[in-house]
Image (cartoon, helix red, strand yellow):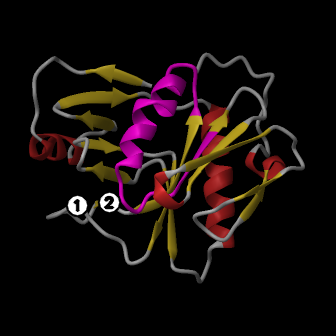
Amino acid sequence: MMQLQEQRYYSPEEYLELEVNSEERHEYIDGQIIQMTGGTPNHNQIALNLSGTLNFLLKRQPYRVSVTDQRLWIPNRRIHTYPDVMVVKTPLEYQEGRRDTLINPVFIAEVLSKSTKSYDRDEKFAAYRSIPSFQEYILIDQYKMHVEQYFKTENNKWIFSEYEDAEESLNLAAVPCQVLLVDIYDKVDFNAEELG
């Protein structure tokens, strides 16, 4: 997923200047620039399936769905990142001085790979929780049918649920949607030899 660039500190402004002119995507984590590698066919299919389903279910509602290339700024952790799927309640809120970097997601989903699953579950989830608008986090396994759901209740308590049956319905808390696991995993080939 990620490769560390040369070890030097970059300001968020330096990162953004480099990033908008780069052909590759990079995360920015408190002064470090980390190159993101491409995803597998299963990873891309899952992100497309979920984002497409959400976009359809939320049409004409006050939400915007983005997939993979929309940059997010997490000011409390000094992180710029690209969630696999993100839902933002309108109006969109941008990083100060930017029109290409959002700051107000209500929902984020990450497709887990072997190289990122620990980071996505731990440090990245902790960073996302520092965003005031953030209410729901979905982690999707690309190697077997398994989805983890975390949603925030009152007093910053998080409820955890998991799903493994194709006919189970994922009832989202942050947006008015229900998504079947079979739809999230449509066209996903678990037998494919993927290193991820």
Picture disc at residue 103: 2
Residue pictured at 45% horizontal, 39% vertical:
125
Instruction: Write down the quadrant of residue 9 in the picture.
Output: top left
Task: Please say if 94 is above or below 186.
Answer: below
Residue pictured at 57% horizontal, 26% vertical:
113
Residue 174: x percent and y percent? 57, 64
The three-letter amino acid code for the residue at tag 2 is Ile
Using the image as rendered, state which of residue 176 and residue 45 is in the foreground: 176
Side (left or right) of 142 relative to 14: right
Q: Residue furthest front?
A: 155
Label 2 SS: loop
How far apart, in angstroms, are the residues tagged by discs 1 and 2?
Answer: 6 Å
Circles 1, 2 touching at the beta carbon (< 8 Å): yes
Residue pictured at 47% horizontal, 57% vertical:
155
Q: Which residue is mark 1?
A: 95
Magenta segment: does it hold 132? yes
The three-letter amino acid code for the residue at tag 1 is Gln
Side (left or right) of 170 relative to 120: right
Residue 166: x percent and y percent? 87, 44
Label 1 SS: loop
Picture disc at residue 86: none
Q: Which residues are magenta?
A: 112-139
Residue 33: x percent and y percent? 23, 30
Instruction: Write down the quadrant of residue 21 in the picture.
Output: top left
Badge 1 or badge 2: first in the primary sequence: 1
Name the quarter where the N terminus is drawn. Answer: top left
